[in-house]
Amino acid sequence: MKRTAFKNGIPVLLMVMMLCLLLPVSSHAVINGLTGALGTPVFNFTAKDGHIRSGDGDSIYMWGYAPTNTGVMQYPGPTLIVTVGDVVTINLTNQLPLPVSMVFPGHSVTAVQVTGTAIAGLLTTEVPPDKGATTVSYTFTASQPGTYTYYSGTRPDLEVEMGLVGTLIVRPTGFNPATVPGRIAYNDPIIPTTPPAAVATAQLSSYDREYLFFLSDIDVNIHKQVELGQYYLVDTTNRHATSWFENGRNFPDTMADENAAYLPSQPYSAMPQMHPGERVLIRLVGAGRDLHPFHTHGQNHLIIARDGRLLNNALSNTGIPDLAVSDFTTTSIPGETVDEIWGPWTGAKLGWDAYGPAAGIPLLGIPAHTCTPGPGGFDITGQAGHNMFEYCPDHNKPFPVSLPDQTSLTFGQMYGGTPFLAVFGALPPVNVRQNQQGAMTFMWHSHAEREITTNNIFIGGMATMAFVLPYTTASGVPIIIDQFKP
Amino acid sequence: MTYRTFIKSWGALLLVPFLLTSILIGVSSGAVIDSWLRAEVKVIPVGVFGNHSSITMWGYAKCAAGFTNCTTATVPGPTLTAAAGDTLNIHVFNNISGSYKEPTSVVIPGQTKTMAPVWFNPATGAVTATGSRPAGDVTSRVRSFDAETQFRQTTTYTWPSLRSGTYLYESGTHPAVQVQMGLYGPLIVGAGAGPEATLLFSEIDPVLHAAVSNGDYGPGKTVTSPTGYRSQYFLVNGLPYSASSPAVAAGSPGQTVRLRLLNAGLEPKMPTLQDPHHLLPPTNQYMTVIAEDGNVLPHRRLQYSHLLPPGKTLDATITTQPNAAGGGNIVLYDMKLNLSNGPFSPGGALINLNVGPLPAVMALPSVLNFGAVPLFRPTQMVVAIKNDGLMPLIFTSATITGPSRAEFRPPILGLTTIPPGTSSSLTVLFRPTTEGPKSAALTLISNDPNLGTVTIPIFGNGY
């Protein structure tokens, strides 16, 4: 390359890199769902049947809520996203052979017959199986922010099993995914942060990215019986769950694209991605009939709320969640929701420099890196983003183990080749590299291990991988996390 | 006699254990409460909640002193009440007859007393010791947490000083079999001044009960142990929801009600609130848990449902608001979704908390689907009209409306006044005179203040 061109190239490259750092990162992850008009959102649903794909390619018959704008039944039901204070209305019609309805635990709902002949059910007003002749509207005020669930209040032992269940998210006042102080789950007070943090103060419910974890279990035999039209013969006391889902998908589909074309009735992905130093909000929804120990590898998460209420001694939803608990496994209980914050991950105290040797690895083109300690010993200024949030006391600590020869090893599909963020290494010939950015990957799964199988094959079921992606590649190209791409 | 002589003689023998007991348990400062409970077989007849066979349970009959004037045995057993600091004596008479007999006992997890566990040799079945494991014996096992009461014998179990709260009393002998057979009941120590409702959850595995009642349970029999436990009926206060199951009183509008939740079953429960008639404030549709296992919580928990594992007790409060209709039902149901009686729905672990008290109408089923019926063939379906409340439900009219009403014979209402917790049946006749889909609606008018008019859609198809 001509020296002159190279010399001119560097400033341009630097400008591009700096611009990328200055630009607001446009895709801070926001959960996929339906929003409506501010103040009075209205949603139109039809209860109808369809099929979903299991992780091994099988087809499972389901009943679910279809937003009438797409007409496609989906599992889970559409995630409704509204703002605190909104008066929310859902109009429901029914294409199924049994009556259906909707209940919203924690909310005071007025259910009204709009057209046709509604039924007074045990839990709420229901829509008879009259192919759309009856519409019932369910109206409630979303009086508190948080994560909630909705499901059919009609024969729920059968209808929740069949898939009539979804999530409701209520945004707090001042929520704005585009700004740092605007990414909040509740209206708790702003308090001083603890290292590592890029800002001096924040709410405890503030986060950088949010992900839905809708955990469910089904007994496929019941679905087969219903598919044959024998819904009146189903004895749900015989139920024995054999299939487990995160966001309506089995592993590895949990890691497929959001709105994957080959999963038309399972639009929601479950693959968290984040950068070091980021806080990730997990909205955990218990949507099946069994309890699941939800386990986040990598580090603990901080449980800040249950059932849409901050864990607070004064029982105030605008107070500091002073009863927040740090744990690595949270029991997901049917019908209950949990809000928990995972992170920030920094590689601190792993025992080695998570970014590799300070001098770099010239053979692999890995540049040298330095660490300038800020509060708590974390480098919050970064070096062109490569090792932002590095924990400086671990700087240049060597990896404590000498790995055997490549020919004596085999690795999981998520190993990048070295134990360093953004640094690739050679893999044995038989190994596939699924980790395209040199990320750290952690399995977030049900720790009831039989639940991470699909049809008796490991790995499947209620499992996914969370990716901690470096801010840039080792050569300085920014890595932008797009919520809806792998 | 000097003090020294007193101690040397017989005082030492008596004083030492007394002192130890007092230090460990505390000296009682309250009244002495005596309960006489006769443990015996109780049979649930066919059809009480859709069961095809009768079900043999083991329950407690409440008796007066000396086991006179015993009531029928109930499952759960009678609610025992006392004040904090009281001494409780439960006199148990073992009247469990039938092909399979066992000694029994009573324990109260969370309440302190000196226990005398019973050890046995698993090979011979013979009792080898009571109290501590005999030295050097590595084969004996405990089969009873406290002294056993043999068939037709009586034992008095004493708790010298009760702690306040909500507790379960249950059999402490071979509990894997005896507790699920029905030997459990609530103990409330220190009831407050305001309204309270006790909600005790449990289950029935009818196959296990049949094996026990037929003498077909045990090693070498058809059912060898409870490890194959598979519950089919899910109870609240001894009954699943059905056409005949009572609501529970929950005060009147504006009061704070203390719900005492107990799980005497073998599976976790998640009691969840549903408020269709707006009796709870819109901003507080939640239960506040204030105590767990009789312990007042230092930090209360605010959730719309709470996990209640087996053996757990929780005290939770709800506060209703003034209500224009004067009250109505709040529904409490298990989010584990055990809400059917075998294959029949609705059923299972669902109960109404009746605020008022008021009547409350419920039509079962809530929609009538005759399906395909040949022309001119009269076909009837029955609707059970249940009073889900705690005051009499009075009907003033039952009419059929809709485009096809001429093909439906006017209904005959069995009863116009329905007592609380019971149902009356109503027969609707369909006789299609032309082909094609038919639709109509049955309209019932009653004194239910929230659902004064109930409409049941009717579908049918003439061919």
Image (cartoon, helix red, strand yellow):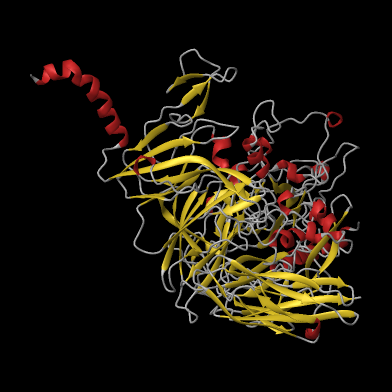
Residue beneath the point at 91% across and 37% down: A429
Picture residue at 51% right of the left edge, 40% below the top:
B40
Q: What is the residue that sits farthest to the top in this orientation?
A: B136
* Residue sitting farthest toward the left: B1
Tell whether B79 sits left or right of B328.
left
Instruction: Choose between A170 and B462: the one closer to the eye.
Output: B462
Quadrant containing the N terminus of chain A is: bottom right
Please give the count of numbered marks on the rendered protein: 0
- Residue B51 image point, x, y percent: 67, 52
Instruction: Give x and y (percent) for residue A215.
Output: 70, 55
**Horizontally, is A357 left or right of B393 in the view?**
right
| Closer-to-camera residue (B217/B297) | B217
**A288 left or right, relative to B14:** right
- Res. A388 in view: yes
Front position in the image: B47 or B239: B47
Q: Nearer the viewer, residue A379 or A271?
A: A271
Q: Quadrant of residue B388?
A: bottom right
Is A148 placed above or below B456 here?
Answer: above
Provide residue A131's location: percent of width, then percent of height: 82, 76
Q: Which quarter of the picture shows residue A424?
A: top right
- In the rendered structure, the answer to whether residue B151 lies left or right of residue A63 reads left
| Picture coordinates of residue A143, whole percent (x, y) | 55, 74
Classify the position of the C terminus of chain A by image quarter.
bottom right
In the image, is residue B21 above or below residue A16? above
Looking at the image, can residue A45 be seen?
A: no
